[in-house]
Image: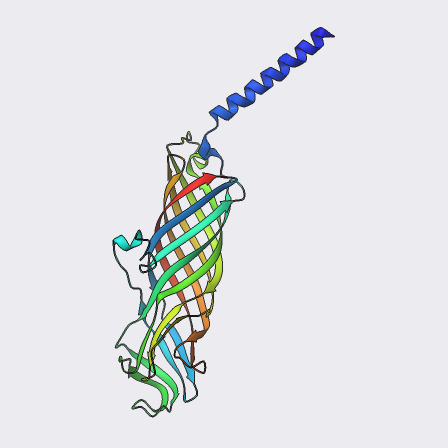
Amino acid sequence: MKNIVLFTALIGLFAFNSIVAQDQNQKYTSNNKGKFFVSWGGNRESYSKSDVTFRGKDYNFTIADMQAIDKPKGWHIDYINPGRMTIPQTNFRMGYFINDHYSLAIGVDHMKYVMTQNQTANISGTIATGSIYDGNYNNTPTVLTTDFLMYEHTDGLNYVNTEISRFDDVSRLFKISNTDKIQINFTNGIGFGLLYPKTNTTLLGKERHDDFHVSGYGTSIKSGLNITFFKHFFIQGELKGGYINMQDIRTTKSTDDSASQDFFFFQRIIALGGIFSI
């Protein structure tokens, strides 16, 4: 009996030592499940042309194929200045790995959308505001001067979204020896969310409006490269494309006035972040 107990104890001790040895040899970056991450970065955007409809008590017209651009800040201290971090075009994200490959995250893509001023666009509809622009328009070429329209989502075109992403460790894909000093991951994901822009508009001489308002929804897909350094710090580059549909954009102080538009966007992102086990 004593021999059986001794043999069992030795087997248990050997098994315990084996588990400890495996844990000590296990690379921190070899597993993602249970890890939390947060990132902050900047972006540039491109937008497709968009038909924008403006509605009010005394006007209803559509501007066809409106052109717009982003409003880059460039390399600037504002990206890390706590009091001015929302001024540049930025991306914030935090998430959690539900297993080694998939993460769930929430975040805000703070983009900027600025109508190209003085462009010539075709307008269809009616205007009867008592201004020089009154009349019936039938696909009429019109110069979008500052007196006629200034239109931008610059504080900003806020895409508040949820993403599910897949991460694949390059070392596993190509059977390369893993290391905790540097890890390279391919990442792909899909997202959806709400548009919460602060729209800055001056329309047909009406009082300027600039306020936050839930205006619509968006969807997106992305692909990128994540490089993790010393277990806990990473830099991530992404290409993201998506569709935005806003049917309730505030344009003036009056709730009778609104605009609607939909368009596609293409975003280039570079972000820095940290990843930690919980």
Vertical placement of residue 8 versus 19, above or below: above
Residue 166 higher or lower than 141, as above or below: above
Q: Residue at x 41, y 50 (%)?
A: 223
Q: In this view, does 239 lie above or below 25?
A: below
Kindly identify the residue that appears in the image at 67 percent across and 9 percent down: 6
The one nearer the camera, 28 or 252, is 252
How far from the left and from the top, in percent, is residue 143? 27, 81
Model colouring: rainbow
Q: 136 or 204, which lies in front? A: 204
Q: Quadrant of residue 108?
A: bottom left
Q: Nearer the viewer, residue 78 or 25?
A: 78
Please state the total of marks drawn on the protein image: 0
Q: Position of residue 244 (x, y in %)?
A: 44, 66
**Residue drawn at (45%, 37%), measured in percent from left and top?**
173
**In the rendered image, is residue 148 in sight?**
yes
Q: Which of 139 and 17 is in front in this view?
A: 17
Horizontally, residue 136 falls left or right of residue 6, namely left
- 10 lies left or right of 277: right
User: Residue 171: x, y in percent?
Assistant: 42, 34
Which residue is situated farthest in the front direction here? Answer: 83
Is residue 47 something one can see in this rendering? no
Residue 130 place in picture, x, y as percent: 34, 93
In the image, 29: left or right of 119?
Answer: right
